[in-house]
Amino acid sequence: MRHLGGDRFEVHSAGSHPAGFIHPLAVECLTRLSVPMIDLRSKSWDEFLQTPVDAVITLCDSAAAETCPVWPGAPIRAHWSIPDPTYHLGVADERIEFALRIASRLQTKIQGLVDLDWSVNPQEIQKRLEFLGEI
């Protein structure tokens, strides 16, 4: 999101059960897509529990099924079902190709998020975020 939206957004990425490292498939994809990895690290969403956010988007289906924390300000929430490439079987080249397809799909959704008109009412933003989850 930082790569596509620049300084228009303050972005946080975290997980419910962080691995403690950035997976090599993610590093390879980001490198191939020329996405900067400045300050990229594995972190828990607990780190942001006191941080006001406008929107929370879950990506993997296991996280969507979990009870998410209560965020200050009751942000808009959406789920975008994205397969986790780390579980894709195959030889290294096949796994990287799959991860790149997933990254491209995610980039399309994120570009839609960046292009949203954030001045509309929260219900409309919610509908648009849900639509982005379907594409």
Image: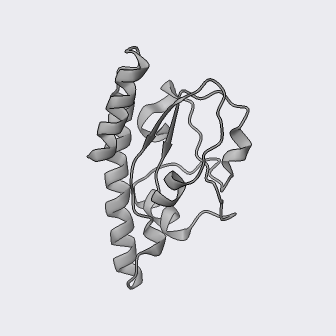
Q: Which picture quadrant has residue 32?
A: bottom left
Q: Residue at x 46, y 74 (%)?
A: 87
Q: Is residue 10 left or right of residue 109?
A: right
Q: How is the image coloured?
A: one colour
Point out residue 102 in the picture as x, y percentages from the top left corner.
35, 60
Q: Position of residue 60 (x, y in %)?
A: 47, 57
Picture layout, residue 54 above or below residue 103: above
Residue 132 falls in which quadrant of the image? top left
Please state if 7 lies on the left or on the right of 48 as rendered.
left
Q: Nearer the viewer, residue 11 or 83?
A: 83
Along the horizontal axis of the image, is 87 left or right of 112?
A: right
The percent coordinates of residue 33 (x first, y second) are 39, 55
Residue 118 position (above or below residue 53):
above
In this rendering, the answer to whether 50 lies above or below 67 is above
Q: Nearer the viewer, residue 94 or 84?
A: 84
Instruction: From the top left corner, tell me how far across and down residue 30 is, in percent.
Output: 46, 57
Q: Is residue 131 above or below residue 124?
A: below
Image label count:
0
Q: Residue at x 37, y 15 (%)?
A: 120
Residue sitting at 61 percent across and 53 percent down?
Answer: 15
* Residue 111 in which image quadrant: top left
**Point 69% across, 39% down: residue:** 48
Q: Residue furthest left?
A: 135
- Residues 66 and 21: in front is 66
